[in-house]
Image: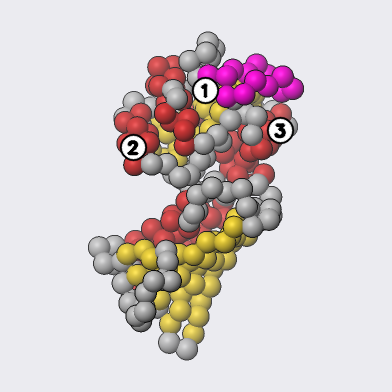
């Protein structure tokens, strides 16, 4: 039985994780952590990481980047609990803290936990390597109006995948062309964002060449995809003994 801590248990995604865990006979939720008090969840909850006095096999975090600054990783390191980080938008300082914690315990960190996106990153790298600099790469992403970071972490992950297949030292990212009046160079990857309504997540990678265009598109219809991926990552991480940052299950 895999015993989980759900960080951000009172948020939308935290509750989805709890619901999926309840239907998985191999998973049990040992505790939840939320900065606000919670009384309607079927497991014990805490309002701080330092207050947790139990044990668990893996922590799943669907809260916010701020969790890194208020003791989440300190608790994980102290109690030797591997962590699945499902949040994007970390600052450089927060990323440094994650890397430091990963020297002491396994951490699963990826911008997107869906199986489809993980496959798509591999396909984008292969396509970029095959098509080369004769094809311009543009990435468009759309999310719900409440998403606070732009571009999405997944868009950046796909851009990294394209750059890996092209010329990593030559390619740069362009997020805004409104103040430029010049032709597009072949050393840039364009990334654009849309925010509105309840769009769970859409990502399109465009390879535009001379007289032909190739598109890869991934659409999420429910954020349950990410919760299920988080539990799958937790199961993977439970079998890892070596510290480090992992991004594929």
- Looking at the rendered structure, the secondary structure element under dot 2 is helix
- Looking at the rendered structure, the secondary structure element under dot 3 is helix
Q: Position of residue 82 (x, y in %)?
A: 45, 27
Q: Is residue 24 visible?
A: no
Q: Tag 3 or tag 2, which sits nearer the N-term?
A: 3
- Residue that appears at 56% across and 28% down: 7
Q: Position of residue 8 (x, y in %)?
A: 58, 30
Residue 43 is a magenta residue = yes
- Residue that appears at 64% across and 57% down: 196
Q: CA distance from mark 2 to mark 3?
A: 33 Å
Q: Is residue 40 visible?
A: yes
Q: Would you place residue 36 above or below residue 204 in this image?
A: above
Residue annotated with mark 1: 57
With 23 as the anchor, is 108 left or right in this view?
left
Which label sits in the foreground, 1 or 2?
Answer: 2
Q: Tag 3 or tag 1, which sits nearer the N-term?
A: 3
Which label sits in the foreground, 1 or 3?
Answer: 3
Name the mark on residue 188.
Answer: none
Q: CA distance from mark 1 to mark 2?
A: 27 Å
Residue annotated with mark 3: 19
Q: Which residues are magenta?
A: 35-48
Q: Tag 2 or tag 1, which sits nearer the N-term?
A: 1
Residue annotated with mark 2: 93
Residue 54 is a magenta residue = no
Q: Position of residue 185 (x, y in %)?
A: 33, 77
Q: Would you place residue 208 above or below residue 146 in this image?
A: below
Q: Position of residue 152 (x, y in %)?
A: 50, 53
Q: Residues within 10 Å of mark 1 (few under 14, many from 20)?
A: many
Q: CA distance from mark 1 to mark 3?
A: 18 Å
């Amino acid at each position: 039985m895999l015993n989980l801590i759900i960080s951000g248990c009172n948020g939308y995604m935290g509750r989805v994780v709890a619901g999926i865990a309840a239907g998985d006979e191999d998973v049990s939720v040992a505790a939840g952590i939320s900065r606000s008090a919670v009384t309607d969840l079927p497991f014990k909850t805490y309002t701080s990481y330092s207050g947790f006095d139990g044990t668990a096999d893996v922590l799943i975090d669907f809260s916010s980047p701020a969790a890194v600054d208020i003791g989440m990783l300190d608790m994980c390191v102290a109690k030797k609990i591997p962590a699945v980080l499902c949040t994007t938008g970390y600052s450089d300082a927060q990323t440094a803290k994650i890397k430091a914690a990963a020297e002491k315990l396994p951490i699963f960190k990826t911008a997107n936990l869906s199986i489809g996106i993980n496959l798509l990153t591999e396909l984008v790298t292969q396509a970029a390597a095959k098509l080369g600099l004769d094809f311009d790469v543009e990435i468009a992403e759309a999310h719900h109006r409440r998403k606070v970071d732009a571009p999405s972490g997944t868009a950046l992950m796909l851009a990294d995948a394209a750059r890996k297949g092209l010329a990593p030292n030559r390619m740069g990212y362009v997020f805004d062309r409104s103040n430029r009046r010049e032709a597009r160079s072949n050393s840039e990857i364009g990334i654009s964002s849309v925010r509105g309504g309840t769009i769970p997540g859409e990502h399109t990678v465009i390879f535009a060449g001379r007289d032909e265009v190739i598109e890869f598109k991934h659409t999420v219809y429910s954020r349950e995809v990410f919760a299920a991926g988080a539990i799958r990552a937790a199961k993977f991480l439970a079998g890892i003994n070596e510290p480090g940052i992992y991004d594929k299950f």
